[in-house]
Amino acid sequence: MEFAVQTAWLGLAVIHLLPAASAFSPALVERLYGVTPGRDLAVLIAHRGVLFCAIVVGCALAAFDPPARRTMGVVVGLSMVGFLLLYLRAGLPAGPLRTIALVDAVGLAPLAFAIWSAWPQQAA
């Protein structure tokens, strides 16, 4: 079971690598999000990438540090579900945002497993 949990957390880290890398690559921002950030927007998008670096590091930590799993489950859940709700509110736009939404939607399965495994199960 522990191997499956670690794999789920590492999978979550992997799906957040490209958004994290956008902190360091304006070209990647254009490819991932379909926008050419101006000066102010570039700072915000880069900061978003840095926050995803924290998600990647936190997921990797949770893979090998069980006490971190509950907190990271909440953090990653807020990020992924939050994006999906914002995407829904925006009217499910086509293009790069749809790809991000699909990846986040697929990522909900390992996230749900990781969160479920972080809480002890009560015997019936």
Image (cartoon, helix red, strand yellow):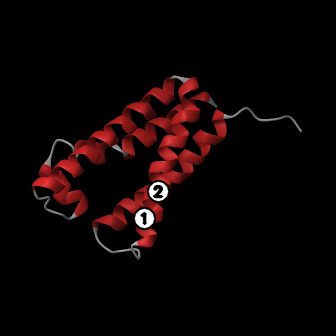
**Coordinates of residue 97 in the picture (x, y in percent):** 32, 65
- Residue 30's disc is none
**Coordinates of residue 37 in the picture (x, y in percent):** 14, 58
Q: Give the distance between the C-alpha atoms of the residues marked 1 and 2, in whole angstroms.
A: 6 Å
Label 2 element class: helix
Residue found at x 56% / y 51%? 109
Splitting the image into 4 quarters, where does residue 14 fall?
Answer: top left
Residue found at x 49% / y 41%? 75
Residue found at x 82% / y 35%? 122
Q: Which amino acid type is marked by label 2?
A: Gly
**Coordinates of residue 27 in the picture (x, y in percent):** 12, 53
- State yes or no: discs 1 and 2 in contact (Cβ < 8 Å): yes
Decide if residue 5 is on the left or right side of residue 58: right
Decide if residue 55 is on the left or right side of residue 50: right
Density class for disc 2 (Cα within 10 Å; few <14, some 14-19, many ≥20) is few
Density class for disc 1 (Cα within 10 Å; few <14, some 14-19, many ≥20) is few
Q: Which residue lies furthest to the right in this view?
A: 124
Residue found at x 50% / y 29%? 62
Q: Can residue 36 be seen in this view?
A: yes
Work out whether 108 lies above or below 47: below
Label 1 element class: helix
Quarter of the picture containing the C terminus is top right
Q: Which amino acid type is marked by label 1?
A: Leu
Query: Mark 1 sits on what residue?
Result: 86
Splitting the image into 4 quarters, where does residue 55 fall?
Answer: top left
Quarter of the picture containing the N terminus is top right
- Residue 82's disc is 2
Work out whether 108 lies above or below 62: below
Q: Is residue 18 visible?
A: no
Decide if residue 35 is on the left or right side of residue 109: left
Work out whether 77 lies above or below 102: above
**Coordinates of residue 88 in the picture (x, y in percent):** 45, 70
